[in-house]
Amino acid sequence: MLHDGDIDVVGYGKGPGRVWASMNGALTIRWEVDLPRSLALSEVTLRLLRPDIGTVDVPATVNHSAGRGWIAGAEPTSNRALTHIVTHWVNLPEILPAELLRNEHRSWHGRWVGEGAGWSMTLDSRPDLSQVLSAAKDSTKLVPTYTGDLRPTDGSPFAPAAAADVLYGWQVALSFALGRWVAPAFPVGFDADGRRVWEQWGPWRCDATSGYRSWWDSRNGRDLEDFVRLFLQAWSDPDRRDLIWHLAHHVIASNHGSTTLEARIMLVQATLEYLSWVKYVVPGHRSRSAHKKMGAAGRLKELLTSANIPADIPTDFGALDQYAAQEGLPDGPAVTTFLRNRLVHPKDAGEPYQIQGLIFEAWELSMHYAELLLLHELDYRGDYVPRFPEDRWAYDREPVPWL
């Protein structure tokens, strides 16, 4: 529950109401007000009193004339400087190793601390995290799993405008590590006197806990510390942020199970093309015409070679190997880009489906390239969990190939 009390629907009147978060398959903010008259199905303003902040106006949408709807986004604030933010992270897994936590009933290992770009995030898991995650497995349930405390490492106050930006950076970093969206939901900012002076309400992106492949091993919290530090350094750099943001967003989207494999291949391949363009053409290292002449396979192989990522077709990918032999294609970049072109501009619409497993393997190999290339762009030097072979142990990780 985010608000329980009188709400003034501007232009319609005031009545008892509430604002709450719905977590049934998606994170959305809902509201309802008991009014004597019906509402038009349109946009309205909700005026309500927030603790320590005062009266705030919140834009909302009506989806039922009886006085119900949703809130697309709002930031109630007093515009006073913040010292720290408390938030609830939704659908984060267990992060191990972890520091010991205690309450009056039990003790458990549940605290992880990460730092980056002058910010520190302390994540404390709920004591029943294992049971909650087990109950949420193979479902669309969204559950708060950690409480997060975010603050500058030097203890300096910060403006409310900085709060949303830095939280978003943490969200993208942890989501890329997991290959799915996790959410820092219901954040509240406090000032030096402990007063609640900023809140954020919104439809945070968040995915289910299962059904996603991840390059990061959740039993390796030390590598997560290194990755987050490097990611936030890039996020805070105006010259690097757009590239990191684009790559991370599109790799997460390319890993989403509700999207067709064909669309995922096109999206991740477009991401690799973007990376090549930004690295070589935008800074003037190569002309547009010369870049185009290299071809998609040549550009991708160049990226892989610079990161010491093998370009050979993995021995586990029998369908890709068969297709490459059939088409006379020499390596992984050639066969994945060739297949992408066949999906977009087919000579025979059924051709890519004549070899069982071909589309899946092309997606897997393309995702392998994209994840490693973003890690290389950050100069990450820890371990990762390869996507293949299929029968490897779940937590069987290895060093990145550029070490």
Image (cartoon, rainbow, N blue to C red):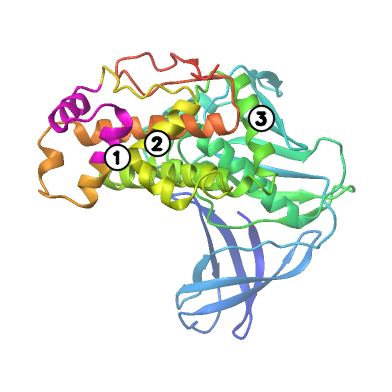
Asked if residue 62 lies left or right of residue 350, the reply is right
Residue wearing tag 1: 337
Q: Amino acid at mark 1?
A: Thr
Q: Which residues are magenta?
A: 317-338
How far apart marks 2 and 3 lie (CA) works out to 41 Å
Q: Nearer the viewer, residue 322 or 65?
A: 322
Q: Which residue is mark 2?
A: 300
Quadrant holding the N terminus: bottom right
Say which element carries label 3: strand
Task: Name the residue: 40% across, 38% down.
Answer: 299
The local secondary structure at tag 1 comes to helix
* Magenta stretch holds residue 323: yes
Number of residues whose C-alpha sits closer than 10 Å to that of mark 1, classed few (under 14), some (14–19) or many (20 or more): many
User: Pointer 2 and pointer 1: residues touching (CB < 8 Å)?
Assistant: yes
Which circle, 1 or 3, is nearer the viewer?
A: 1
Q: Nearer the viewer, residue 308 or 38?
A: 308
Residue lying furthest right: 193
Residue 316 sits in which quadrant? top left
Q: Which mark is residue 124?
A: 3
